[in-house]
Amino acid sequence: MPTLREFLNRLLFFRRGAHFDREMHDEVQFHIEERAAELEDRGVSKDEALRRARAEFGSVQLAREDSREVWQFQWLEHLLMDLRVGLRMLWRSPGFSALAILCLTLGIGANAAVFSWVEGILFRPYPAVVHQERLMALSGISRGETGITLLSWPDYLDLQRNSTLFDAFFVSKITGTTLSIGERAERTIGSIVSANYFDAVGVHPILGRGFLAGEDAGSSAHPVTVISYQLWQGRFKGDPQIIGKTQRLNGVTHTIVGVAPQGFYGTFVGWAMQFWVPASMEEIFESGGYKLEDRNARWIESYARLKPGVTAVQAQQEISALAGRLEHDYPVTNRGRSVRLWPLWETPFNNAGTLLPTLGIMLAVVLCVLLIACANVGNLLLVRSLARRHEMSVRAALGAGRARLLKQLLTEGLLLSLLGACGGLLVAHWCRHALVLLFPARGGVSMYLPGDIDWRVLGVTSVVSLLATLLLGVVPAIQTSKLNLATALRTEMGGVVGGHGKSWMRSSLVVVQVSLSFVLLVGTGLLIKSLEKIRNTNPGFATHRVLLTAVDLVSAGYSAQQAKTFQDELLERVTALPGVESAAFARMAPLDFGSYSSSPIAVDTYNVLPEEQPTVEYNEVGPGYLATLGIPLVSGREFTRADNESAALVAIVNETMAAQFWKGKNPIGERVQVKGRWLTVVGVAKDCKYQSMRELPMPFFYVPRRQNFTIGGGLNIRTPLAPQELASALGREIHSLDGNLALYEVITLQEQLDRSTASQKAAVTLLGVLGGLALLLAAIGLYGVMSYAVSQSARELGLRMALGARASDLLRLVISRGLALTLGGVALGAAAALGLTRLLVNYLYGVSPRDPQAFGFAFVVMLAATLAACFLPAWRATRTDPMRALRDE
Amino acid sequence: MLKNETQLLPGTLFLLILKSLARGPLHGYAIAKRIKNASGDGLEIEDGSLYPALNRLLVKGWVHAEWGTSENNRRARFYRLTAEGRKQLHAEARDFEKLVKSIQLVMRTV
């Protein structure tokens, strides 16, 4: 039995390999001379003694070869030989090889691409950040509630100060500002961070510095910023003197103190950060004023890095204990609250949490595709192994051990999957940044969803390929193990198209392929139908003839009074433009990013239960907003210009709110308390979709902008004009009012709706592409099996023809055999799909996971693919020349 | 492997080499000679198979080789038993004796 010692000795041999020949030569020389000397002593002449000694020894060369071989790794030699033979086999049948490698390339490539996304988005989402494997996200949780909250700055500081199991804590809260680049205003995304940020993530600015300790304290005390490499190159043209220059961010002049290195995109899954400001500047970027001393203001997104060797469980215990102490010390603000650590891939406040289930499903799907690809190649190998039966039998007859033959087959499988893996990695490399293509840019900014092909992705891909090898090697191996020398050396008799027996394994592989692709087709069908449902859902507002745009007055540093004047003037000019029917400002556009204002409300006639605290969301809208968006008014009136600061406070509620709080009574003239002020209801509007097309009807109300003024807000315009037709006129009007201002992109409300369903569309696209791939592979598999069956049963077909079968009979015979396989696969696949489609339930809208239409769709597509795959072999069957087929026998 | 009239059981060559080294280091030629003499010329190891066998013992770590000078002051490669080799020798010798005894028993009784 080979031991480790033996292995090491062999390895050492390689180090003194050069000596070996010389030593061996010396040793043999000594042996021969010693023998010669002995013979000489017995009286043989010197020359004769030497000759005899040499003859006795035999071949020196052979002794040396044999001795050398003792040291070598025999399996290595055999492997090299198998590889040589394998390569020759692949080379000899290029059609087979190309098809097999193509199948594997697609299968392994799809896997590697999804692995690279999982790695780049979930496991190592932050390029250039050190020790991401120990990084965890922090959020607040409330007992008895499922959602999460963010943390308050004082709570965060206490956790950081009192914990012992962490290397570092840092804050990174996403925010944005508007930077005008030429004629266009563009949304620019950045982070509000703690002063230790750049040290904590281990990134050092290439110019200037990071933030200094203490720069994250005080109210707007440190207007400094570090900009990204991209921003430096793009907006500042790579100015080497950039440090110390200033840039207005949200209306406040910030000094640029540093430039981050290329390849650092901050710490937010989904977007590349362009600038960083210290937490002391939060009130400039966040609503709600100065919050650094407010334990009740929960706004920060933060991370903590575990010390090496600390487990997530230990860390959570410490954090929970610290949160418990905070709860005890500050009962007013912290009662019922705790803090939770999340692995990066579950980070609740960025896109990781939302992409996790999607990528999970993707992994399952690409695994299916790989299985289908493997089944295909397995089938090809099987067909070939039958053709090679003769060769194998001869080799076995010549004394090759079964293990040796198996090794040869496995090596060939390995070769195939190795080539497939190389191709697959190439495919993955091309697709690694493809995910972002599925998500439309918003405000001119594309999402940042990079794939990453690192050693871990390579590792997992290799494991997958090795598993594929085993799968591939096993198929012909089973065939070989049943090798019976006596019968196999005789040539195989032609098979029977309609027959069973030997072809069962090929057939079952096809059935498995069909069933797997059927499952994927059902999933695709469900998602398509669901997307259709979403598209056909009435959003409650007009999607045509309404345009959305915005002017960022916050970034331009407007005061509330200036903003009111500007917006009034702009509104007047816009409504005067030809083609514009009406226009209105509103703080939020429907289905937009961001959140509506919300407030606990009270209503005279509605008795609140003790533990109930009804909170309702609302939007601050200008006069004529409902008419502009095409939201019908059920009763009462719209806001007018008269609903201003000096008028009585009013509100318009939606139907759901009216029904919930006034129980069918007409709410007009009733009072509702919002943020401590009493408002009179003057109108009831129809329900519409507010944040997502998939939301259920919810209570909602509107208040006049003038009575609840915020500077920010978008402009909604009712017009039959296309966005680009209006954009330049709008831009001119804005420029003439203030030369420093620029317009955001102008989009239709339909475009806004489409963007809000992007993740559904992405799911449909991904599953559609992979489902199509699976279908193609399965069809190739079916085609291969049917072609082979036809080619093997030429004699039977010829006989049938000779006995009077017509072409149509043969056509029917072959196609019905293909259909039988498909039906078997569909039955199996339908059973599997009934269980599996539940996984999609979060992506479905108004469609049951067992929707019969989706199953029907999958069935029809599968049937069509079957007919297409069987047609060529069937047609070939009808071209059988009976004379030749019978003569060949 | 062995030039002899009596067929040897497989693996016996290792045992013979190990045994011949039991009393001290020897070079290859001396090993062959000792086996030949000790067996009363009954066993003669073919020179061509001696060295592959020695190398196999080296791989297994049962013997150790070093260059030294022979009785007539010539440079020769000497093989010496390692501790492991000695253990192996005892084990194999025991097994061999048991085997021989068993065979003898069979030969006498059956």
Image (tube, rainbow, N blue to C red):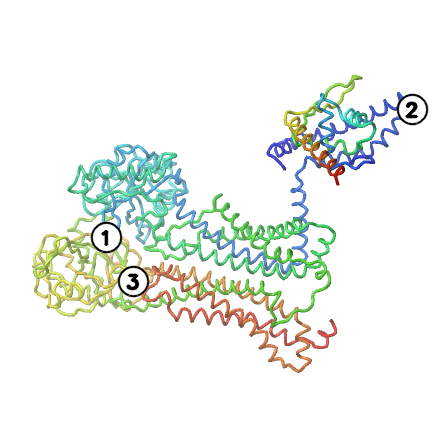
Q: Say which chain tag 1 marks.
A: A
Point out the frontmost of discs 3 and 1: 3
Identify the residue under disc 1: A738
Determine the CA span between mark 2 and mark 3: 108 Å
Sequence-wise first label, 2 or 1: 2
Say if A388 sits above or below A51 in the image.
below
- Percent of width and height locating residue A82: 66, 48
Determine the CA span between mark 2 and mark 1: 121 Å
Q: Quadrant of the N terminus of chain A?
A: top right
Say if A294 sits above or below A422 in the image.
above
Q: Residues within 10 Å of mark 3 (few under 14, many from 20)?
A: some
Q: Secondary structure at mark 3?
A: loop
Point out the frontmost of discs 2 and 3: 2
Identify the residue under disc 2: A44
Q: What amino acid is at disc 2?
A: Val
- Percent of width and height locating residue A729: 28, 61
The image quarter containing residue A64 is top right
Labels 3 and 1 touching (C-beta < 8 A): no
Q: Quadrant of the C terminus of chain A?
A: bottom right
